[in-house]
Structure formats: structure tokens, C-alpha cells
């Protein structure tokens, strides 16, 4: 029953969000286009419900000449590729708001485990232990307010499992308001610089160069 109510809430709030945030969309679109050439949005293949793949939407935060198929934190000098607008979008998480459309059509939920990249096999495997691949992924979740980009794979999967085990209205409200607080404090956000390159289990998911070449329009 909760999952049905959750889907109805997602549908209603995502529709309202698209309408209310439309002026912000317009401002960000203009800012992105003025600063650098390339598409406004980019698509990135992610893992959804029951490990089915879907394309997540984000505002582009990097230049189109960024090396493709390389996570941001593995670039030699990621700051040279992230645009000024992109840095602001990442810090405030505004680059994520196009995912309201993913929520509206049912590919995502407002609250849930963040969808893994299609090639984050270690994270996908760890989540299988906790049933976290068997619920709809979310825009934000329990792991995001308890470490975000700084979490090792094992810890992130355990937190996702904790969400699955305690999923309900109270947990979703904790995640929702916790996310607002985390954004205001910029907790756990890394723009690609201070992450240890020798630590492969740091799941940095905010690199928009993965499918850049498919979105140059």
C-alpha cells in the first residue's frame, strides 16, 4: 500500500515541481548556453528497478571536450573541464532537477537509493545483498544525507539497505528534510578534486562526460 501511495505522491509533486520550477529551468538553460557550447541536458545510463537500465537526465556541468567514459574524480585536472555554471549547479545540486521528469514518468522516485551507473558493478553487487536493486531509485536517499560522494561502496550499500528495511513515510520525511539540510551545508559534495584516485570504491556519480558524444546537438 505504501508503494502505491508513494507513487501517487511522486506523480503529483513532480508535476507541481515542473510547473513551479519552470522559471528556474529557463534561467539555468540560458546560463548554460551562454557560458559554453553544447547541449543543455545530457543522458546517462543508470540502473533502475530490478536492475533495468534507463537514462537519467541532468543539466550539463562540463565542457563537451571532456574525455568521455572517465569519471570526474579520475581526470588529471577536473576543474579545467567543469564550467563556472557547472560548479554552482553541482554545489547546489541544481544539476539534478531535470530528473523530476524521470520521477514523473515513474523511472525514479523522490526518495530512494540513488541509481547506480550501469558499470558500477561493485555497487550493484553490494546492493543485491540488501534488496536495494528491487525498489525504484530516488532523487535522494538515506545514503545521500549520510555521506554522499564521500562514502565507500560497502557503506553506501548498507545505508541503502537500511532505507529498504525502514522504508515508510517517516523515513522518507527524514531523507527529504535531511537532503535540504545537506544541500545548505554542502555536506559530502566533491566536485572531482579531493577524491583519492587510488580508491576505486569511491562512487563519484556526478560526471556528465560519460555520454557526452551522444548529446552534441
Image (spheres, helix red, strand yellow):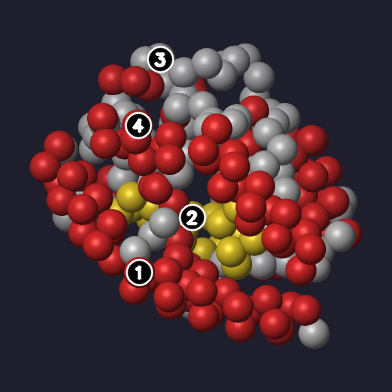
Return the disc, 4 or 2, that comes first in the chain's sequence. Answer: 2
Crowd tier of the residue under label 3, counting other residues whose Cα lies within 10 Å: few below 14, some 14–19, many 20 or above: few
Q: Residue at x 53, y 40 (%)?
A: 183
Return the disc, 2 or 3, that comes first in the chain's sequence. Answer: 2
Q: Secondary structure at mark 2?
A: strand
Q: Is residue 106 visible?
A: no
Q: Is residue 69 above or below residue 127?
A: above
Q: Residue at x 17, y 55 (%)?
A: 217
Crowd tier of the residue under label 2, counting other residues whose Cα lies within 10 Å: few below 14, some 14–19, many 20 or above: some
Q: Secondary structure at mark 4?
A: helix
Q: CA distance from mark 2 to mark 3?
A: 24 Å
The residue that label 2 is drawn on is 45
Give how far across and how far down residue 181 sits, in percent: 59, 42
The residue that label 3 is drawn on is 76
Q: Which label is found at residue 20?
A: 1
Q: Residue at x 45, y 27 (%)?
A: 191
Q: CA distance from mark 4 to mark 2?
A: 22 Å
The residue that label 4 is drawn on is 87
Give how far across and how far down residue 122 sits, in percent: 72, 40
Q: Is residue 177 above or below residue 106?
A: above
Amino acid at each position: 500500500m505504501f508503494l502505491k501511495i508513494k507513487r501517487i505522491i511522486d506523480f503529483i509533486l513532480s508535476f507541481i515541481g515542473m510547473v513551479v520550477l519552470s522559471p528556474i529551468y529557463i534561467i539555468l538553460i540560458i546560463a548554460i548556453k551562454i557560458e559554453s557550447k553544447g547541449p543543455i541536458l545530457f543522458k546517462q545510463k543508470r540502473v533502475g528497478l530490478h536492475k533495468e537500465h534507463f537514462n537519467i537526465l541532468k543539466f550539463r556541468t562540463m565542457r563537451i571536450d571532456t574525455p568521455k567514459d572517465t569519471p570526474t574524480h579520475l581526470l588529471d585536472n577536473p576543474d579545467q573541464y567543469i564550467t563556472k555554471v557547472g560548479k554552482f549547479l553541482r554545489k547546489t545540486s541544481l544539476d539534478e532537477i531535470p530528473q523530476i521528469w524521470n520521477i514523473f514518468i515513474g523511472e525514479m522516485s523522490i526518495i530512494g537509493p540513488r541509481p547506480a551507473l550501469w558499470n558500477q558493478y561493485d555497487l550493484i553487487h553490494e546492493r543485491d545483498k540488501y534488496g536495494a536493486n528491487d525498489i525504484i531509485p530516488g532523487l535522494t536517499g538515506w545514503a545521500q544525507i549520510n555521506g554522499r560522494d564521500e562514502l565507500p561502496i560497502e557503506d553506501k550499500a548498507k545505508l541503502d539497505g537500511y532505507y529498504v528495511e525502514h522504508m515508510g513515510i517517516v523515513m522518507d520525511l527524514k531523507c527529504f528534510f535531511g537532503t535540504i539540510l545537506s544541500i545548505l551545508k554542502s555536506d559530502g559534495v566533491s566536485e572531482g578534486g579531493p577524491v583519492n584516485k587510488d580508491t576505486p570504491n569511491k562512487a563519484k556519480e556526478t560526471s556528465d562526460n560519460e555520454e557526452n558524444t551522444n548529446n552534441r546537438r
